Amino acid sequence: MTIRTKTPDLLDDPPVPVQAKLAAAWAGFMFLYIYVDYFHLYKPGVIDGVRAGVVFEFDVSPTLLTVMLASVAIPALMVMLSMTLPARVNRATNLVVASLYIPYSVFNAVGESWDWAFFYGLSIGIEVLLLAFVLRSAWTWPRTPAVPAGPATTGLRQDVRR
């Protein structure tokens, strides 16, 4: 007598290219980055400050808004650059930009009261985890072994002199 057991089909788990992992991490970082800024507006007094022309300790000016736009545009561009740059440049760019954004993210908590520690701790913690993932993924980018030019590859070359 044969006993049949039904085994579940295993899900296919194809490898994800490094570029897609990096783009996904930057996209997640952007969503979080934008929503943290949005939820920050719910803090008492923030809207009154914006109406008075002050953000944090800075007067609202074209320069301030340009800096704020650049701080959001760079990670947004990293989503596209992570998918389109050549591997060597892509790796270096991700390492540099993620390294610069870690202290920048932590700076968001400067001057905040302990009442908001959980909000900023959670948001900055997740941002830093995403940036650490970018750093790890870029740092451990798989390498393709170089094919040595020697007797083993000589037969693969076509003789154009014929």
Image (cartoon, rainbow, N blue to C red):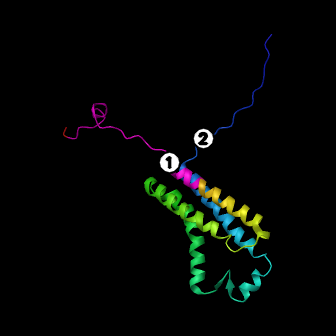
Q: Which residues are magenta?
A: 133-160
Q: Could you tell me which residue is drawn at 28 percent across and 32 percent down?
A: 155
Answer few, some or many: residues within 10 Å of disc 2's Cα (few below 14, many 20 plus, some between 14 and 19). Answer: few
Q: In this figure, which residue is indicated by the disc labeled 1?
A: 141
Q: In this figure, which residue is indicated by the disc labeled 2?
A: 14
Alpha carbon separation for disc pair 2 and 1: 17 Å
On-image quarter of the C terminus: top left
Front label number (2 vs 1): 1
**Cβ atoms at labels 2 and 1 below 8 Å apart:** no
Judged from this view, the residue extending furthest toward the top is: 1
Asked if the stretch drawn in magenta spans residue 142, the answer is: yes
Q: Position of residue 39 (x, y in %)?
A: 75, 71
- Of marks 2 and 1, which one's residue comes earlier in the chain? 2
Left or right: where 118 falls relative to 151: right
Q: Nearer the viewer, residue 132 or 86?
A: 132
Q: Amino acid at mark 1?
A: Trp
Residue 120 vs 15, above or below: the answer is below
Asked if the stretch drawn in magenta spans residue 156, the answer is: yes
Tell me where residue 101 sits by quadrant: bottom right
On residue 65, the disc is none
Q: Position of residue 109 (x, y in %)?
A: 68, 70
